[in-house]
Image (cartoon, grey):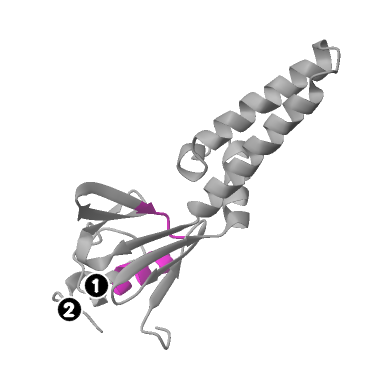
Amino acid sequence: MTRTGTWSFATTVGRVEVAPDEIRVRKGLARVAETTVRRLASGRAPPVGREVGWSAVAGAIALLGALIELAAGSGEGIEVAGFALATALAGTGVTALQNARVEVSTRDVQYVAFRDGDVVVVRDDGDEGETVLRPRSPAARNDAALAFRLRGIEVRGAADAEGVSRTVVDAPKAEPVA
């Protein structure tokens, strides 16, 4: 725990801080890029929709237009295609920066579930939603379970999760630590 009363654990794309009043998910852009490259190298599609949204689609279309203009065109429209590509890439970067930080109020969290190696924060903040966290290691999963339990959040499915200590699973529901 830090001096500010925050527990944290590492995920595959950044860090999660479990503070007294909110859960802060901070994604490092370098880690997002590295994870995307690793997923592509292993033959899996990266979660582009979650990270950069439709800006990436616009960037791909602009890139295609620029390549077509270079290959088949007279070259007169390359400035327009280049401007479209630069604008789309800037939009992709802005969207990625906006999505690099997510904050969830602990009052809105119904429970935290351990599913298939992921930690899923299930919330009810008007429209039910889930925030999926991928801890970097079994030790990080253990830290996640402990942090959520110490904040008084119900932890489900951790009984059979590797790396989560029996102390966290079997302990009675703790009072939130301020």
Q: State the residue at coordinates (50%, 34%).
A: 54
User: Can you say whether 176 is above or below 86 in the image?
Assistant: below
Q: Amino acid at mark 1?
A: Arg
Q: Furthest-left residue in view?
A: 172
The disc label shown at residue 91, or none: none
In the displayed structure image, the side of residue 167 where residue 140 appears, left or right = right
Nearer to us in this view, 77 or 137: 77
Q: Residues within 10 Å of mark 2 (few under 14, many from 20)?
A: some
Q: Which mark is residue 174?
A: 2
> Which residue is pictured at 57% across the width and 51% down the height?
32
SS at circle 2 = loop
Q: State which quadrant residue 172 falls in.
A: bottom left
Q: Position of residue 23 (x, y in %)?
A: 34, 66
Determine whether 117 is above or below 88 in the image.
below
Residue 35 horizontal/vertical position (percent): 57, 48
Q: How many dots with numbers?
A: 2
Asked whether 53 or 30 is in front, the reply is: 53
- Near-viewer residue (95 or 129): 95
Answer with left or right where residue 13 lies relative to residue 79. left
Q: Quadrant of the N terminus?
A: bottom left
Q: Residues within 10 Å of mark 1 (few under 14, many from 20)?
A: many
Q: Quadrant of residue 2?
A: bottom left
Residue flagged by tag 2: what amino acid is it? Answer: Ala
- The image's mark for residue 149 is 1
Q: Does 57 lie within the magenta span?
A: no
N-term-proximal mark, 2 vs 1: 1
Check contact, mark 2 vs mark 1: CB within 8 A.
yes
Magenta span main SS: helix
Location of residue 167 by image quarter:
bottom left
Q: Which residues are magenta?
A: 132-147
Q: Is residue 97 left or right of residue 141?
A: right
